[in-house]
Each structure stands twice: as C-alpha cells, then as structure tokens.
Image (cartoon, rainbow, N blue to C red):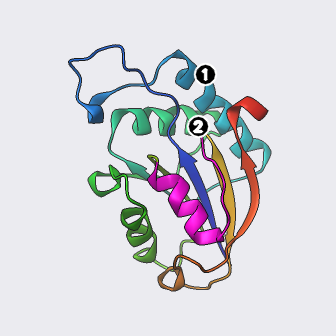
Amino acid sequence: MKTLLILRHAKSSWKDETLSDHDRPLNKRGQRDAPRIGEILHEEGFQPDLVLCSSAVRARETARLALEAVDFNGKVEYREDLYAFEPGAYLQALVGLDDSVDQVLIIGHNPAMEELLNGLTGEHHMLPTAALAHLELPVERWSEISFGMRARLINLWRPKEI
C-alpha cells in the first residue's frame, strides 16, 4: 500500500495586482490555516518520505508553514510542472516516483487537486483552500496508480471544520 496526502495550497492574496498568478503570496487566512494543517500532520503522525510542491509562491509558503508545524526535515521538491491546473500533471509526477517512497505529500492547485482526489477515489469531494486529504492507494508501485482505481479516502480535513 502507498499513502498519498493531497494538500491544496492555503488561501492566497489578490491584494497586489502587479504580481503574476505564480507570484501571489498567502493572505492572512492562508498564513493562519497552513500551520493548522501542519498540526493535523503532526497529530496524525504523518512523516512523508517526500513532498512534491508546486513552484508557485502560495504553494511554497503553504509547504513551509505546514511543514514547520510538523518539524519535517525530509526532502521537498518544488516543481514547475506542478504549477498546473489539470490533474494529469500531478498524476504523472506520482506515477514516476521511486517505489521506495511509501508516503507522499503533494501540494498544488485547484481544480487539479480536487480532480486528482475525485479521480483516484471515484467519489466527489470538495477541496477548499488548505484542505488535506489522506488516501490509501491499493498498489505496491507508483506506476500502478490511475484515475478510477478506487483509492480509499481515509480522512479529509477542511480548515473550517477543524
């Protein structure tokens, strides 16, 4: 079994209209919610073998704040290909993982994160900003994952519910 943690970046700011979408930071709510998700990671005992994160500023800030809360010292990959809004980019990144990796946290953007969650579980779930989903994948190798595989959603934490 492989474990996948899907985290949509926390709420971003639209305050500075001169910034590109890629360069938008977190707003105050996002800065508050990201560490709360880190606390969930800590309380649940998650220690990912690898974190895959979009290169966007808001995703990197979400990763930094959440991982500080869990005192994570593992490997984080900030990837341009995960500054994506289609789920295929995220699925491709996962399929290419080394099989020695058992637990992965992936941080990215909607609608792709929500579509990834729904495509893997075959269920419909809303994934607001800073929401974290815990999936159990019925595979031994990352290359075996695909949409429609019926991954099991173990839990879904939304900031407004925690």
Q: Is residue 124 magenta?
A: yes
Residue placed under numbered mark 2 in the picture: 130
Q: Quadrant of residue 149?
A: bottom right
Q: Which residues are magenta?
A: 111-129
Residue 98 in picture, x, y percent from top left: 45, 77
CA separation in Å, label 1 and label 2: 10 Å
Look at label 1 and name its amino acid: Arg
- Looking at the image, residue 64 sits to the left or right of residue 83; the answer is right
Q: Secondary structure at mark 2?
A: loop
Q: Residues within 10 Å of mark 1 (few under 14, many from 20)?
A: some
Does residue 87 appear in the picture of this structure? yes
- Looking at the image, residue 21 sits to the left or right of residue 73; the answer is left
Q: Is residue 154 above or below residue 79?
A: below
Q: Quadrant of the N terminus?
A: bottom right
Residue 24 in picture, x, y percent from top left: 33, 27
For marks 1 and 2, the one nearer the N-term is: 1
Return the mark for residue 32.
Answer: 1
